[in-house]
Amino acid sequence: MFLKEPIRIVNEIYDYIGQTDDDYVDDYERKANDDLEKRLMPDEVKDVLLNCCQVSIGNIECNEDYTGKICDIGCAYGFILNKIKAKEKVGIDISLAYLKELDDTIAKIRCNAEDIPLSDHYFDVIICTDVFEHVQDELKLSNEIERLLRPGGVLLLATPWEQDLSVYETEEYIQKYKKYKYVHLRSVNDELILRCFSNFNMIASTLITIGMRHMDISPYPLRFMQLQKNY
């Protein structure tokens, strides 16, 4: 499964980042620690995302070529990956603090989402929720996802949808929330999804609005998508 040796192994986490002064990594490590303390995503949103993934995976399991290998890119503390069933589960995140929260049955890898040290065409399913809008290079992420999925494999992608990013420059947002250097780096729409996942077919899509009532400045929905890689 692994393409190269990690820099180190910490608490059974295969670490491909190591000690660093990278402000992007440091910013997300701070955010992860805050999330573990305060649970920044509302429980009802997590429950909807988990349910969407469970239903999708349940349908995929009926396929004859399904082998039960699932990877969650940007798995956070495992609110999805800890609860789904699979023969082999891999959690990838940039944060050590998050990865320490994963179940012992999960292979834990600390690396950048745009450079994943795993074998080609290895997974049946890749989960990627609340990550696509954060990475520095969305095309590199989509290329990694395509490389890691077997032909016919499925991506379960969730991302803010058609968000107005100007909110991050408003006085109200800066006074209330401006704490991290890196927030959402792009607004996602149909055009961007088609450009990044041109070798995928859209199987299903649903707009998730339940979290909007928790947002007091420029609320936005999430879109959950099931995309299948072409054979």
Image (cartoon, rainbow, N blue to C red):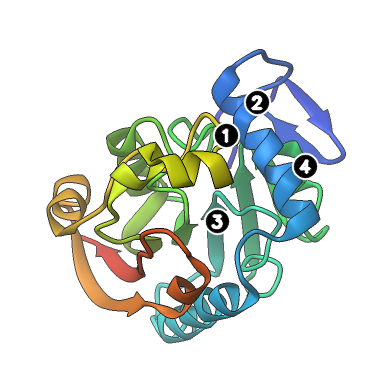
Q: x and y percent of residue 109 in the render?
A: 66, 40
Q: How far apart are the two marked residues, 4 and 3, measured between alpha carbons?
A: 16 Å
Q: Secondary structure at mark 4?
A: helix
Q: Is 7 left, or right, of 111 in this rendering?
A: right
Q: Secondary structure at mark 1?
A: loop
Q: Which mark is residue 97?
A: 4
Quadrant for the N terminus, please.
top right
Q: How far apart are the two marked residues, 2 and 3, measured between alpha carbons?
A: 21 Å
Residue beneath disc 1: 180
Quadrant for the C terminus, please.
bottom left
Q: Nearer the viewer, mark 1 or mark 3?
A: 1
Check whether the beta carbons of the residues at disc 2 and disc 3 lie within 8 A of each other.
Answer: no
Check whether the beta carbons of the residues at disc 4 and disc 1 lie within 8 A of each other.
Answer: no
Q: Amino acid at mark 2?
A: Asp
**Earlier-in-chain disc, 4 versus 2:** 2
Residue beneath disc 2: 26
Viewer can see residue 119 = no
Q: Secondary structure at mark 2?
A: helix
Residue beneath disc 3: 72
The crowding category of the residue bearing disc 4, from other C-alpha atoms within 10 Å (few below 14, some 14 to 19, many at least 20), is some
The crowding category of the residue bearing disc 3, from other C-alpha atoms within 10 Å (few below 14, some 14 to 19, many at least 20), is many
Check whether the beta carbons of the residues at disc 4 and disc 3 lie within 8 A of each other.
Answer: no
